[in-house]
Image: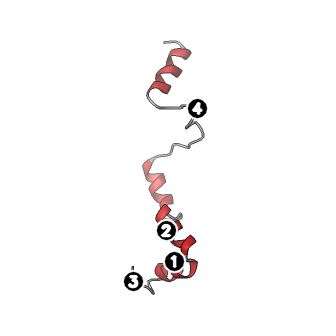
Amino acid sequence: MSVKEMVFKRRKNGMDSPKTSFLVREPIETYQAKSKDYLTSHQLADFRRNPVLFRKKELGLVPE
């Protein structure tokens, strides 16, 4: 199989397409280990809406 055929096959399967070539692939264990250090999209929305309330929820001072 030529290099050109391999690239076409990978792109056909959704791998290494130009639209997603900037994404980093990492094992699920690494991703899940890092997830505790970052906000989810919902947490980020709550923080943007009201940072003080977000912090109180984080500390368990306000029921969700």
Image position, residue 9 (x, y; %)? 46, 21
Q: Which mark is residue 54?
A: 1
What residue is shown with label 3? 63
Rate crowding at label 3 as few (under 14), some (14 to 19) or many (20 or more) other CA atoms within 10 Å.
few
What residue is shown with label 4? 18
Q: Which amino acid does label 4 sit on?
A: Pro
Pick the quarter of the image with the C terminus.
bottom left
Distance (Cα) linking label 1 and label 3: 11 Å
What residue is shown with label 2? 43
Q: What element carries label 4?
A: loop
Residue drawn at (58%, 36%), measured in percent from left and top?
21
Q: Which mark is residue 45?
A: none
Distance (Cα) linking label 4 and label 2: 30 Å
Q: Which amino acid does label 1 sit on?
A: Phe
Asked if the residue under mark 2 is in contact with the one under mark 4, i.e. CB atoms within 8 Å, the reply is no
Asked if the residue under mark 1 is in contact with the one under mark 2, i.e. CB atoms within 8 Å, the reply is yes
Residue drawn at (46%, 31%), measured in percent from left and top?
14
When the figure is inspected, residue 62 is found, relative to residue 48, above or below; the finding is below
When the figure is inspected, residue 51 is found, relative to residue 10, above or below; the finding is below
Distance (Cα) linking label 4 and label 3: 45 Å
Rate crowding at label 2 as few (under 14), some (14 to 19) or many (20 or more) other CA atoms within 10 Å.
few
Image position, residue 26 (x, y; %)? 50, 45
The mark nearer the N terminus, 4 or 2, is 4
Distance (Cα) linking label 2 and label 1: 8 Å
Q: Is mark 1 on a helix, strand or loop?
A: helix
View extreme (top): residue? 1
Image position, residue 30 (x, y; %)? 48, 52
Q: What element carries label 2?
A: helix
